[in-house]
Amino acid sequence: MRSIHYTRDALVEVLRRHDINPTHQRIEIAYALFSRGEHLSADQVLAIVNDRHSQTSKATVYNTLNLFLRKKLIREVIVDPSKVFYDPNTIPHHHFYNVDTGELVDIDAAEITISGLPQLPEGIVTEGVDVIVRVRSKAE
Amino acid sequence: MRSIHYTRDALVEVLRRHDINPTHQRIEIAYALFSRGEHLSADQVLAIVNDRHSQTSKATVYNTLNLFLRKKLIREVIVDPSKVFYDPNTIPHHHFYNVDTGELVDIDAAEITISGLPQLPEGIVTEGVDVIVRVRSKAE
DNA sequence: ACTGAAATTAGACACAGTCCAGATTATGAA
DNA sequence: TTCATAATCTGGACTGTGTCTAATTTCAGT
Ligand SMILES: [Mn+2]
Ligand SMILES: [Mn+2]
Ligand SMILES: [Zn+2]
Ligand SMILES: [Zn+2]
């Protein structure tokens, strides 16, 4: 994921494969996320996309991020009480979260094993398991 | 935790042991959390505390919850992008989170084992590990 | 071109949470 | 008691994220 060089043309195909009509704004938003491969807040996406000159509204950024989520093109990471992070990496993985710096780093799910999870009650089904390792820069 | 019958007098002692001056409002807020042993949002705490007649302001509820957090009398659970939940259970544990109902259920940390977590970089120290099992009521 | 559907937009709005300056309450010395 | 002082609480303004809406723009198909 980190190594792929996403072109806008390649992203148009990715969007199509996820049943998303590839408009200008959607391509730019996808490009912001996938070309960097970073966890970004909606605010950051808005800033990146409007950095040069273009013109994408806040409403469209939110609409598009929620559309991408619904279509499972990206996932959300909930670690900060004040904002959601959007993650272009949809391969199952977990996170280090540095509560001092706000830095968010992936942990491959294949590396770790979780055992002993209690049985789910009848009629309940697992959606996913999130492991968040909260870390601090040493020195309290 | 679930079985203890907290009286307000007992809570005064708990507050004192955590270096918290036990005021009326703080006792009521602690009572809301500990007598129920449930995960509550600030909004829910405000509603409970003001249910009968008393008068505790929103500012005080937030100030007090943050004070309780700082003194490690309670912990916060971040699973919902729109609000924080406050948890009177400070024994290490994890959570089931029903994304349909919003229900939050504890999982004893002693029951589960997580292995294979990568080494932390130099100068970084773990603050805690949160496991969130997101579940849905069956039928999509 | 013309038309309807899809997408985008500005700005109003909702709501969690913070901040502040003034009022209230607790503490405790005189 | 009385008074001074510090601690706490309060209403209400404010901030930041995220949603909603009605009007406009863009797009696809004819
Ligand atoms: Mn996908
Ligand atoms: Mn404690
Ligand atoms: Zn990630
Ligand atoms: Zn809990």
Image (cartoon, coloured by chain):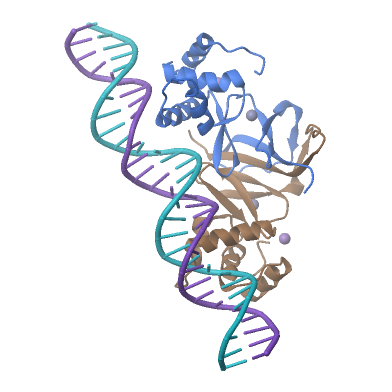
Chain colours: A blue, B brown, C purple, D cyan
Q: Position of residue B85 (x, y in %)?
A: 57, 51
With respect to residue D14, does A79 lie above or below? above
Say which of B134 and A76 sits in front.
A76
Q: Is residue B4 visible?
A: yes
With respect to residue A5, does B104 lie above or below? below
With respect to residue A73, does B37 lie above or below? below
Residue located 65% across and 56% down the image: B69
With respect to residue A34, does A137 lie above or below? below
Residue located 61% across and 12% down the image: A5
Q: Quadrant of the N terminus of chain A?
A: top right
Q: To which quarter of the image does residue D24 belong?
A: top left
Q: Position of residue A107 (x, y in %)?
A: 71, 29
Q: Position of residue B131 (x, y in %)?
A: 68, 41
Q: Position of residue A48 (x, y in %)?
A: 52, 25
Q: To which quarter of the image does residue D28 belong?
A: top left
Q: How many marks?
A: 0
Q: Is residue A124 visible?
A: no
Q: To which quarter of the image does residue A125 belong?
A: top right
Residue located 50% across and 44% down the image: B82
User: Would residue B81 be found to the left or right of residue B67 on screen?
Assistant: left
